[in-house]
């Protein structure tokens, strides 16, 4: 049987680390699946790292990676898969909202020859209507960009070593793991799961952080926002053309065009459209700037395996 590496990014999850490790270890040991658990502390401000070290002292199959600061979930995922040594790699949340039992179903599909196994949400759990609609709009855009159906997609996945190496070989700094697993191709299967209720702690995602996360990943993976700029420019041109024709007709009919309010509104509208367009273009330029600088995706300050410090073996950065 191939070894399974389970990657779990963690940010201020001190209440869930111990339980998640116990549940997963018991599940995989009972199924007689060789495993390692790779927990990545994304610069937490609580005792997450201490809890990871405590779990590692109790179970030699646990590896901990500690960032020098908070670099974000995407960086934590890539740090985890970069350190993983398994023949197959799974990524899941450490709060047990991704049901651990589904890992067994994914693993069996991998044994059948599937190289990418996607976890697909049957429902989005206890989310607000606004959150669900926003997520649906985001995934429609990403589905158009990738050519892969990403409705109800999640970070809960299992990838063969071949797929993992393909993703790690990509040179760009800004990567969207949830979409890349579908973009790389390979033989793919999907497994449906119900999002579980969080057992302890609270979600670290605010409304603003979700908006920022969505926009960052859209820009990282597609040029659709730039196409919106083009469409906005075309709309402004059509409106100006209509007003031009209207003004000429009124002029030749001998009527003065009373348009101070209209002109003011049009100037404000066009000015706003131009500034928003420059903002979108500027955001893309900032991402190009980040890529050109070639800074690492993350920095590792400490690494632990089985309770022992192995920082000397760690990759210092995310290159």
Image (spheres, rainbow, N blue to C red):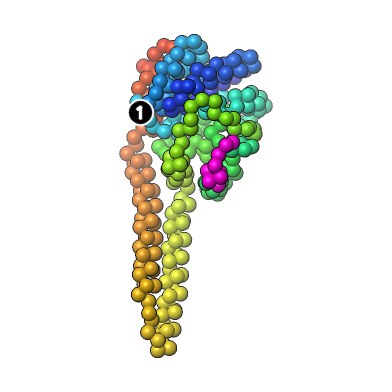
> Can residue 131 be found in the magenta stretch?
yes
Q: Residue at x 42, y 36 (%)?
A: 171
Q: Residue at x 64, y 37 (%)?
A: 122
Q: Nearer the viewer, residue 180 or 209?
A: 209
Secondary-structure class at tag 1:
loop
Q: Residue at x 36, y 55 (%)?
A: 278
Q: Is residue 135 visible?
A: no
Q: Residue at x 40, y 89 (%)?
A: 254
> Can residue 300 be found in the magenta stretch?
no
Residue most extreme to the bottom: 254
Locate residue 163 relative to residue 194 in the image: left or right: left
The mark tally for this picture is: 1
In x, y percent, where is residue 217? 46, 42
- Rendered view: 140 above or below 238: above
- Rendered view: 273 above or below 143: below
Quadrant into which the N terminus falls: top right
Q: Which residue is mark 1?
A: 69
Quadrant into which the C terminus falls: top left
In x, y percent, where is residue 123? 62, 38
- Rendered view: 194 above or below 21: below
Rendering quarter of residue 115: top right
Q: Is residue 61 visible?
A: yes
Q: Nearer the viewer, residue 302 or 159?
A: 302
Q: Which residues are magenta?
A: 125-133
């Amino acid at each position: 049987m191939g070894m399974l590496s389970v990657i779990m990014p963690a940010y201020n999850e001190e209440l869930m680390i111990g339980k998640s490790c116990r549940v997963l270890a018991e599940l995989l040991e009972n199924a007689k699946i060789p495993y390692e658990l790779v927990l990545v502390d994304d610069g937490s401000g609580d005792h997450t790292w201490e809890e990871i070290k405590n779990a590692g002292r109790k179970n030699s199959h646990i590896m901990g990676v500690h960032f020098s600061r908070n670099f974000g979930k995407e960086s934590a995922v890539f740090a985890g898969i970069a350190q993983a040594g398994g023949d197959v790699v799974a990524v899941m949340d450490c709060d047990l909202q991704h049901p651990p039992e589904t890992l067994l179903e994914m693993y069996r599909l991998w044994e059948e020859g599937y190289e990418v196994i996607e976890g697909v949400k049957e429902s989005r759990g206890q989310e607000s209507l606004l959150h669900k609609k926003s997520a649906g709009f985001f995934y429609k855009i990403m589905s158009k960009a990738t050519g892969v159906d990403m409705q109800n997609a999640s970070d809960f996945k299992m990838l063969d070593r071949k797929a993992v190496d393909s993703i790690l070989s990509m040179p760009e700094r800004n990567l969207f793991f949830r979409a890349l697993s579908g973009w790389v191709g390979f033989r793919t299967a999907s497994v449906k799961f119900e999002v579980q209720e969080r057992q302890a702690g609270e979600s670290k995602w605010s409304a603003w952080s979700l908006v920022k996360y969505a926009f960052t990943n859209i820009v990282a993976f597609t040029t659709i926002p730039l196409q919106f700029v083009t469409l906005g420019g075309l709309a402004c041109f059509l409106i100006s053309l209509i007003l031009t024709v209207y003004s000429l007709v009124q002029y030749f009919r001998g009527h003065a065009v009373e348009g101070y309010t209209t002109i003011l509104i049009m100037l404000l509208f066009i000015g706003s459209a131009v500034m928003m367009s420059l903002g979108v273009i500027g955001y893309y330029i900032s991402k190009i700037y980040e890529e050109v600088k070639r800074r690492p995706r993350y920095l590792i300050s400490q690494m632990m395996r089985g309770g022992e410090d192995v920082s000397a073996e760690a990759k210092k950065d995310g290159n």
